[in-house]
Amino acid sequence: MYGEKHDLRHEFPEYEKEIHHLKMNNNHFARFFKEYDDIDDELMRIQQEIETPADNYVDGLKKERLFYKDEMYFMILKHRRKQHIKAIKKTKKRLKKMAKK
């Protein structure tokens, strides 16, 4: 759609906290985030007809943006799973202590 935002905050609003954390603490994610953002900005300029490249170039950009989006989505899910596992372990440890008392 013309002028549609595809930045990660619009694509994954439910993961805003995880995206921020990974951007600040994971260099690999931060690099992918920047690449994704740069490609999205370029595609926005193309949609607004500020730039007019060939169709196959635009298709390549869209595929590249999708690759970065998929990779970052899996990084987000992996981070969320790790946080969930940590919380479970912490709860188990706390419950063990309570059971011993």
Image (spheres, rainbow, N blue to C red):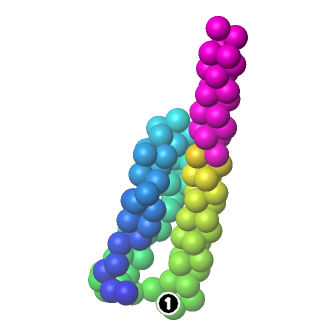
For the C terminus, give its image quadrant: top right
Quadrant position of residue 73 = bottom right
Q: Position of residue 71 (x, y in %)?
A: 63, 60
- Give above or below for 88 relative to 31: above
Taking 42 as reference, is 61 left or right?
right
Q: Quadrant of residue 14?
A: bottom left
| Magenta portion: prevailing SS class | helix
Residue that appears at 52% across and 35% down: 25
Question: What residue is drawn where x is 64% and y is 34%?
Answer: 88
Task: Name the one closer to the observer, 74 or 96.
Answer: 96
- In which quadrant will I find the N terminus? bottom left
Coordinates of residue 93 in the picture (x, y in percent): 67, 21
In the rendered image, the vertical position of residue 6 relative to residue 8, given as above or below: below
The magenta span reads 81-101
Q: Is residue 93 left or right of residue 49?
A: right
How many numbered discs? 1
For mark 1, what is the residue? 54
Neighbours of disc 1 within 10 Å: few (<14), some (14-19), many (20+): few
Considering only vertical position in the picture, is 2 above or below 22? below
Q: Position of residue 96 (x, y in %)?
A: 69, 19
Per the image, label 1 sits on a secondary structure element best described as loop
- Amino acid at circle 1: Ala
